[in-house]
Structure formats: structure tokens, C-alpha cells
Image (cartoon, coloured by chain):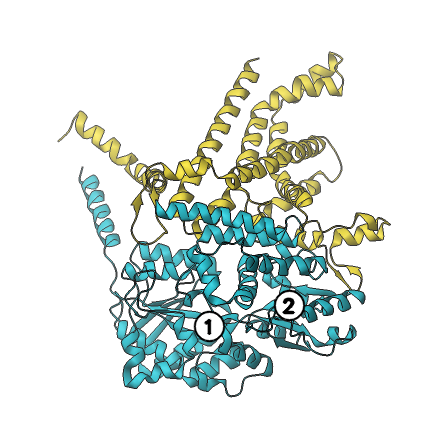
Chain colours: A cyan, B yellow
């Protein structure tokens, strides 16, 4: 009887201990990140920060990014988020986190000292985490995240392979690109590779052409439902993929290729063109240090309009609004985006620094990615976003065009059908 | 404080840890899954009760039912090709043959490998690309070297071949489990039964049909159920072979659930898909058990 009572007491004590949340040390900031390539560099910076301020930065790496996203959502549901973390999802999910009280408004910190912090960073990178007045998500206007680096997705070309095909410069227009594709095929070189097995790269590629063909206003009007996907301009967007397919531009298996494999193909000179982000500079350097390549915007289909590319903050941190160490966390990320730390990160992992002053001595190919920042856009800065199911139909439809299973017109009709269904659902 | 009530209480106390663990890790998640399936919820923020709307939408979701068909196809290949191969090899290794232990080890290597590793190996094997005119993929390279260049193909980028390729790779990876279970079953059959059949003049085929197969029925039932459950839920292999898929041709129920959850942030819908998928798997397993009992009695 006594032993049973003792056992019960022990169980109750264990249960009680399990229910209480351990208090976080006042001089420690907990950071959750997903950037495997930057772990060592961040650890070094964390040690420097501790030496400088006496505040320990505990870095926890959770990768890959899909697993990280799930980890953050689960932690939010259990209310155990760290002081600093990232939301790698669409802007409406960032809005959900803000509404639920998990993200601090950093506007005051950015605007302090006459906006010194804000003006030291690329404005377009800050905009990725900014909610403007009257935003569709109903969030109080403000800046809710800190960009860590910038990036843009560009056309990358192998100079050596282009020379083999008699091409002397990167194509600037779409017809020039198609001519280059023909020339490459004549000498048996696969023209184009990208990780189109990862749908976001198709999204990025297609969005760039959509902005070039019809401009931002019409793209966003389509998302709002006032322009149909069967509009001739959207058919032209889908037609880009059909034209490249018909000319044999795509490397075999492009629609199921992961970006890592696509990067390997380009680095091993299996294709002359690639479509990839700024991080690829580091990847290609590791895979083939002697690779001779250049970076340019995607060749425009409408030369009269700018070739806009996805770009802005590549990765961002947010601060937990409920954190007891909120001010210390803000101070740390502010330090992280300062010139010295950004230059260190860039030198270590070849990323594009978000601090404009740190741009001074970056390599030529990285500079080409940075140059695109001036004409960049990003779904996170658009005032309206497309429904996720419509987007899936859009991207899968493009895959269908690439493999020759369907036509631009058929995809346009199929996407519009999904759009109509989703619009009807929203109205209900 | 002695007597019957206290004894009963003590009994309950002893099973309490097991009941608690079972409740926390099995019953609660299942109830939570059912609850979430009735909600519209992006994974964070307010949860809106929508009743059976998610289930109604699921009924009209052609992509979902197509994905079920794809999983069914993979399962069918596993049930036939994979299990027939496993049974044949188990029968061979049950006899006194040379290097029996070596074969057992070799056949059991594929299931031990991670699905990601298997996916990467087969991705290279089935690659349809070329470099400097030479095939990169091992299969296409072999075809060219064997004088069959007209059979060279983009195996994972053609809707006609991608699903059969996935099914075959899955069968290749999975046959080792069936092999081990079936071999263990074969070794429990009393050798005197074979001896008696031989004395009665039964040939190999009749011995197999009237002795081996009836004795193996319980093991075969287990293998069939495990094959169905394992094959219907395949997804890591698909992700590692074709990433986010070839249009909708490589979608299976689990990848659709993943898309609903992480791609389109429809947690409620994803849970409704999981509930329906789980119910179908339970029903199939139940029917199989019933059928196996009927066959056993017959």
C-alpha cells in the first residue's frame, strides 16, 4: 500500500515537472535556423557576439527547410517558439503568425536613429517582410522580419559551351535565345537545365515572363480574379515553355530534376544554360572550381518592358513577440546585418549580403545577381497572392506543356477552371 | 483499506502506464485527426468548423482518386511481381543449395537501404541525359552497349514509363522483406509432411500445391497485408526519384496529403484525406483477413 502511494506521488511529481516550462536564461538568445551551409559561419559569429556583449547565442539547426517549416508550425501550436526564428512560407502564413501574436513588429527598431538600420539594408529586401497600409491580410502596417541576405534568380550561361556553338554573347531577347538553342543542338549540347522538379523554380521562371509580357498590374489583376488565365497574354506565358520544348531546349528529364541534380548537370557542363539563384555561385565553385560562366537576366520576350526577376530577401528572421529576451534578440539580428558580419558571411558562403555597404568586394558573378535587385520583385511584396490550388494547377500544367502532353491553351483553360472554383468557394 | 475495490484499483494502476501511453500516442492523435478533418485551418491561427465539407470536396477531387489509382498500381506490381519473386527465392533458399547464407544476405540488402539512397541509385540508373553524346544513365548506357539504342528512353520523364519504373524500384526494394518472412514460414513446415507426400508419389508441383501452399497461407496473408500497407503508403521513394512529381502522374495518396498540408496549407483537408485513406487501408486489411479465413476453412 505504501509503495503504491509512493509510486503515485512520484508519478504526480514527474507529471508536474513535465508541465512546467523551464525558464530561459536572461543572457541567452535561442535562434532556430535552417541554413545548413551557414551553420559554421553563424557559429563563429555567435561566438564573436558572446565575446562582445556577454550574451550567448544558442543556434539550433533544423533541416531540410520543409522539416524546419513543420517544426516552427508545431512549436507555434505548442507556444514554445524560440526568440529568433524564420517563417519559410508564403506571406499569408507570416500574416497568420503575426495575427496569432508570434511575431514582433520591428518598425520602431528599423526607424530608430533616423532610420539608420533600414537605410543600411536593401529596401527591396526589407519590403519582403513589410505589410503596407490596407494589405489584404489585414495586418497592422509595419516591418515584421529582418532580411539576412538577398538573392535573385537569373539565367546562367556556360561561356565555354556557347563558344563551341559559335555564340559570342548571352542572348538578350527570346528569339536570340531560341537561335542559341538551335546552335547548341547542332553541336550536340543540351541547351537548358533547371531544377523544374521543384515547382517553385517553374513558378519563378513563369512569373518573370508574365511580368515581362503583361506587367505587374495585369498579373495581380489575374490573382484578384478580374483577368482570366485564358487571356492571350497568359497564353503567351505558357507559350514560352511550348516554344522552348519545340526547339528541344530542355535537358532530358527536366521536369523531375531536383535543383541539386540540375546544378550538378550545369557544373559538369552537361547543359549550356541554367536558371538558378545567387547561391549557385557557391555551389558551382564547390562542384567545379574551373567553370567559366556568366550571369544575365532571362531573355525578354517583350523587349519594350523590363525583364523583372524574383528577388529580394533570400532568407529572413522574425522575432518572437512573446520572448522575454525580445530586445536582446533584436539587437543580435541588427548586429548580424551590420556591414562587418555581412561581409564575413558573404566571404564564407558566397551569399549576397543584405547590407549595401558590404557589396564592395564581391565576385563578378555575385555582383551580376546583385545588379538584378534593382529590377526585382517577389510574391511576398505583392499586395495579393494567388490561391495555392490555382498555383498548383498552373505549375503542373506547365510541366504538362514541357513534356508535350498538353498545349498552352488547354493549360490556360484548366487553370481558369480551378480559379473559378476557388473564387466561388471564397464567395461562399 | 483492503478487499475487492482496492485490489481492482491496484490492477488498474498496474495497467495505467500502458493505457496512458496508448491513449496519448494512439487514441488522442486519432481523435485529433478526426477533429481537424472537420475544420478549415491553414495550420496556424483560427480554426473554422466546416462539418463534412472537406469530405464532400474529397469525393469530387479527381487528382486524389487518381493518386489512389497510382498507389493501387504500385501495390498490384508489388503483390504480383515482388511477392512472386520473394516466394520463388524463398523456395530456392529453403532447399539445400550452395551459398544459401550469402543469397539470404544479398536479398536482404535492398530493404535495409534507405529509400532516399535507393531513389538516388535508381535515379542515376534511369537517367535519360547525355554528355558528349554518351548516355549518363546506366540503363540507357547498357542498352546502347548491347546494340539496342532504339530502346534508349527518358524513363522518369515519360508519363507512360514513370509509374512502372517507380513500381519496379519499389518492388526491388521491398522483395527482401517478403523473402525473409516467407523463408521463415517455409522453415516451420514439418519436413515429415514432404517425406509423406514423396512416399505417396506426389511430384514437386503437387507437393507445393497440397502441402507447401496450404501450410504457408497464414504467412502469405501477413505478407500480402504488409505489402498492401507498405505499397499504398510509399512516398519517400517517389520524392527521391521524381521530386515533386511528373505533372500528376506520380501522385500517390501520401504525397497528396503532403501537398495539402505543406503546399497549399489546408490542414483540415489533409486530415480528411488521411482519415479516408486510413479507413480504406483498414477495410482492405479486414477483407483480406476474412478472405484468408474462408480459404483456410475451405
Residue A415 position (above or below residue A274): above
The image position of residue B136, as x and y in percent, is 74, 59
Cα separation between marks 1 and 2: 20 Å
> What residue does disc 1 label?
A312
Instruction: Judge by depth and name the residue closer to the eye, A318 or A405.
Output: A405
Residue in the picture at 47% in, 28% down = B283
**Quarter residue A324 falls in:** bottom left
Whichever of labels 1 and 2 marks the residue nearer the N terminus, that label is 2
> What residue does disc 2 label?
A274
Q: Does B220 sit left or right of B21 as displayed?
A: right
Q: Residue furthest left?
A: B1
Q: Quadrant of the N terminus of chain A?
A: top left
Give yes or no for contact between labels 1 and 2 (Cβ–Cβ under 8 Å): no
Instruction: Judge by depth and name the residue closer to the eye, A11 or A320.
Output: A320
The image position of residue A166, as x and y in percent, is 78, 75
Residue B72, visible in the rendered structure: yes
Residue B131 position (above or below residue B88): below
The image position of residue A289, as x and y in percent, is 66, 77
Q: Residue furthest right?
A: B147
Secondary structure of the residue carrying numbered label 1 = strand
Q: Does B147 sit left or right of A72 as displayed?
A: right
Q: Answer few, some or many: residues within 10 Å of disc 2's Cα (few below 14, many 20 plus, some between 14 and 19).
A: many
Instruction: Judge by depth and name the residue closer to the eye, B175 or A160.
Output: A160
Q: Answer few, some or many: residues within 10 Å of disc 1's Cα (few below 14, many 20 plus, some between 14 and 19).
A: many
Q: Chain of mark 2?
A: A
Residue A331 position (above or below residue B72): below
Q: Chain of mark 1?
A: A
Marks 1, 2 in one chain: yes
The image position of residue A416, as x and y in percent, is 50, 49
Q: Quadrant of the C terminus of chain A?
A: top left
Amino acid at each position: 500500500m505504501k509503495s503504491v502511494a509512493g509510486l503515485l506521488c512520484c508519478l504526480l511529481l514527474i507529471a508536474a515537472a513535465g508541465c512546467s516550462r523551464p525558464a530561459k536564461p536572461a543572457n541567452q538568445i535561442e535562434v532556430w535556423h535552417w541554413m545548413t551551409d551557414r551553420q559554421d559561419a553563424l557559429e563563429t559569429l555567435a561566438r564573436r557576439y558572446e565575446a562582445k556583449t556577454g550574451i550567448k547565442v544558442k543556434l539550433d539547426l533544423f533541416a531540410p527547410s520543409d522539416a524546419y517549416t513543420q517544426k516552427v508550425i508545431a512549436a507555434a501550436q505548442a507556444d514554445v517558439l524560440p526568440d529568433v526564428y524564420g517563417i519559410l512560407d508564403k506571406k499569408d502564413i507570416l500574416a497568420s503568425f503575426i495575427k496569432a501574436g508570434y511575431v514582433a513588429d520591428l518598425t520602431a527598431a528599423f526607424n530608430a536613429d533616423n532610420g539608420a538600420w533600414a537605410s543600411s539594408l536593401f529596401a527591396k529586401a526589407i519590403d519582403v517582410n513589410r505589410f503596407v497600409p490596407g494589405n489584404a491580410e489585414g495586418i497592422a502596417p509595419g516591418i515584421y522580419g529582418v532580411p539576412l541576405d538577398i538573392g535573385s534568380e537569373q539565367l546562367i550561361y556556360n561561356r565555354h559551351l556557347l563558344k563551341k556553338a559559335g555564340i559570342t554573347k548571352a542572348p538578350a531577347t527570346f528569339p536570340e535565345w531560341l537561335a542559341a538553342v538551335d546552335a547548341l543542338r547542332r553541336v550536340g549540347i543540351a541547351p537548358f537545365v533547371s531544377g523544374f522538379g521543384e515547382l517553385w523554380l517553374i513558378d519563378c521562371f513563369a512569373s518573370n515572363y508574365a511580368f515581362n509580357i503583361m506587367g505587374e498590374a495585369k498579373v495581380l489583376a489575374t490573382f484578384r480574379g478580374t483577368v482570366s488565365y485564358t487571356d492571350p497574354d497568359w497564353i503567351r506565358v505558357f507559350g514560352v515553355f511550348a516554344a522552348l520544348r519545340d526547339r528541344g531546349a530542355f535537358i532530358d528529364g527536366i521536369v523531375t530534376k531536383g535543383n541539386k541534380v540540375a546544378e550538378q548537370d550545369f557544373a559538369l557542363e552537361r547543359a549550356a544554360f541554367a536558371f538558378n539563384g545567387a547561391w549557385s555561385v557557391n555551389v558551382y565553385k564547390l562542384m567545379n572550381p574551373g567553370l567559366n560562366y556568366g550571369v544575365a537576366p532571362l531573355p525578354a520576350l517583350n523587349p519594350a518592358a523590363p525583364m523583372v526577376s524574383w528577388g529580394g530577401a533570400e532568407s529572413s528572421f522574425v522575432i518572437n513577440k512573446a520572448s522575454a529576451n525580445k530586445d536582446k534578440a533584436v539587437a543580435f539580428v541588427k548586429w548580424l546585418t551590420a556591414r562587418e558580419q555581412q561581409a564575413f558571411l558573404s566571404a564564407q558562403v558566397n551569399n549576397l549580403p543584405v547590407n549595401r555597404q558590404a557589396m564592395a568586394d564581391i565576385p563578378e558573378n555575385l555582383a551580376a545577381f546583385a545588379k538584378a535587385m534593382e529590377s526585382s520583385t517577389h510574391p511576398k511584396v505583392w499586395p495579393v497572392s494567388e490561391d495555392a490550388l490555382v498555383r498548383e494547377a498552373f505549375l503542373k500544367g506547365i510541366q504538362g506543356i514541357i513534356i508535350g502532353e498538353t498545349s498552352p491553351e488547354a493549360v490556360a483553360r484548366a487553370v481558369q477552371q480551378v480559379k473559378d472554383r476557388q473564387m466561388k468557394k471564397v464567395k461562399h | 483499506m483492503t478487499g475487492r475495490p482496492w485490489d481492482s484499483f491496484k490492477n488498474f494502476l498496474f495497467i495505467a502506464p500502458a493505457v496512458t501511453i496508448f491513449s496519448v500516442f494512439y487514441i488522442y492523435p486519432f481523435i485529433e485527426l478526426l477533429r481537424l478533418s472537420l475544420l478549415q485551418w491553414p495550420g496556424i491561427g483560427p480554426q473554422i468548423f466546416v462539418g463534412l465539407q472537406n469530405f464532400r470536396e474529397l469525393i469530387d477531387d479527381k487528382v486524389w482518386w487518381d493518386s489512389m489509382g497510382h498507389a493501387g498500381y504500385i501495390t498490384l506490381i508489388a503483390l504480383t511481381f515482388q511477392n512472386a519473386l520473394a516466394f520463388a527465392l524463398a523456395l530456392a533458399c529453403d532447399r539445400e543449395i550452395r551459398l544459401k547464407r550469402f543469397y539470404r544476405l544479398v536479398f536482404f540488402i535492398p530493404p535495409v537501404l534507405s529509400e532516399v539512397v535507393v531513389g538516388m541509385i535508381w535515379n542515376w540508373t534511369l537517367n535519360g541525359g547525355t554528355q558528349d553524346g554518351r548516355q549518363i544513365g546506366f540503363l540507357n548506357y547498357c542498352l546502347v552497349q548491347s546494340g539496342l539504342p532504339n530502346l534508349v528512353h527518358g524513363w522518369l520523364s515519360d508519363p507512360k514509363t514513370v509509374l512502372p519504373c517507380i513500381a519496379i524500384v519499389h518492388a526491388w526494394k521491398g522483395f527482401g522483406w517478403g523473402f525473409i518472412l516467407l523463408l521463415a514460414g517455409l522453415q516451420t513446415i514439418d519436413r515429415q509432411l514432404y517425406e509423406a507426400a514423396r512416399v505417396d508419389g506426389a511430384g514437386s508441383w503437387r507437393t507445393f500445391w497440397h502441402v507447401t501452399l496450404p501450410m504457408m497461407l497464414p504467412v502469405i496473408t501477413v505478407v500480402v497485408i504488409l505489402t498492401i500497407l507498405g505499397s499504398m503508403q510509399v512516398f519517400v521513394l517517389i520524392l527521391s526519384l521524381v521530386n515533386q512529381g511528373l505533372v500528376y502522374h506520380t501522385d500517390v495518396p501520401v504525397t497528396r496529403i503532403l501537398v495539402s498540408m505543406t503546399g497549399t496549407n489546408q490542414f483540415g483537408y489533409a486530415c480528411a484525406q488521411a482519415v479516408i485513406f486510413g479507413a480504406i487501408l483498414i477495410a482492405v486489411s479486414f477483407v483480406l483477413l476474412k478472405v484468408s479465413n474462408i480459404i483456410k476453412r475451405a
